[in-house]
Amino acid sequence: MIIGLTGSIATGKSTVSRMLKQKGYPIVDADEISRLVVEPGSPVLDQIAQAFGADVLLSDGSLNREKLGNLIFNDGAMREKLNGIIHPAVRAEMIRQKEEWLEKGANTIIMDIPLLFESKLQSYVDKIIVVSATPVIQRERLIARNGYAAEEADARINSQLPIMEKEKGADAVINNDGTLDETEKQLNQILLKWDAKL
Ligand SMILES: CC(C)(COP(=O)(O)OP(=O)(O)OC[C@H]1O[C@@H](n2cnc3c(N)ncnc32)[C@H](O)[C@@H]1O)[C@@H](O)C(=O)NCCC(=O)NCCS
Ligand SMILES: Nc1ncnc2c1ncn2[C@@H]1O[C@H](COP(=O)(O)OP(=O)(O)OP(=O)(O)O)[C@@H](O)[C@H]1O
């Protein structure tokens, strides 16, 4: 079974993904892959520099994530442009890693895909878990984790579908407003229902 793990920015996907990794599940992580495909020397990074200017590179040739983030989270057209360059490479690598796990005999694979709904990737997975938090808590955690100003946090939150829309498309929702223990209990219940592994 391929389980898609999604949510919105800072609602707790990585936190739940870590719990799943600890339980031994193989994880395909789209955020991690989106860093891999823009390593210095990669064709994707070249295309980004051509499209956005050499300003989005640091002096060592790596991607200036802060600069590119400020551009794309404040401008929908820029975001579309970046997505068009980076997402095909991310999708290809996600599929490659999934196939690799299947060849190794994995039964259940977790695909952690932040933009699963925005990019309409529902067909990549058999079941979808949405990790949710109420908007006030989401915003507080995002500001605390990244040290963003309120406007920077809001720009990032508003660049994604509202979490309530994502909940409607979920097979299971984990409410991550409470303690990590409470979150893990909800996760265990879902796994018990879907997977005989636990
Ligand atoms: C713009 C970039 C360089 C900013 O880097 P930064 O280190 O500040 O953020 P990071 O990559 O850790 O992303 C944090 C979160 O932002 C959200 N996010 C990232 N990109 C996007 C996007 N294009 N649209 C909406 N939300 C996004 C996701 O929830 C993600 O988990 C980076 O986010 C990026 O390369 N984005 C494009 C690739 C992408 O879509 N990644 C997300 C899923 S594959
Ligand atoms: N139940 C919780 N209680 C307190 N803090 C939490 C809880 N869950 C997550 N956090 C914290 O909230 C922040 C966001 O969580 P996390 O990084 O898991 O979100 P994410 O959905 O993976 O975010 P992104 O989309 O940016 O990758 C982190 O600093 C994390 O430590």
Image: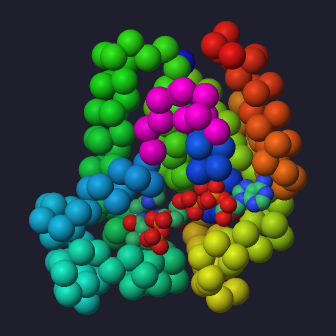
- Rendering quarter of residue 127: top right
**Residue 187 spot, x, y in % from top left:** 75, 33
Q: Is residue 98 left or right of residue 114?
A: left
Does residue 31 show up? yes
Q: What residue appears at the point 34 percent right and 70 percent down from the top-left corner?
A: 81
The N terminus: image quadrant: top right
- Rendering quarter of residue 69: bottom left
Q: Quadrant of ligand 2?
A: bottom right
Question: Magenta residues, as a range?
Answer: 19-29
Q: Is residue 145 left or right of residue 25?
A: right
Q: What residue appears at the point 76 percent right and 17 percent down from the top-left corner?
A: 193
The C terminus: image quadrant: top right
Position of residue 47 relative to residue 25, above or below, is below
**Residue 83 spot, x, y in % from top left:** 37, 62
Position of residue 152 relative to residue 157, above or below, is below
Q: What residue appears at the point 37 percent right and 29 percent down from the top-left corner?
A: 98
Q: Can residue 22 be found in the magenta stretch?
A: yes
Give 127 or 10, whichever is nearer the viewer.
10
**Residue 107 spot, x, y in % from top left:** 49, 14
**Residue 156 spot, x, y in % from top left:** 59, 73
Q: Is residue 91 left or right of residue 10?
A: left
Position of residue 161 relative to residue 116, above or below, is below
Does residue 120 show up? no
- Rendering quarter of residue 47: bottom left
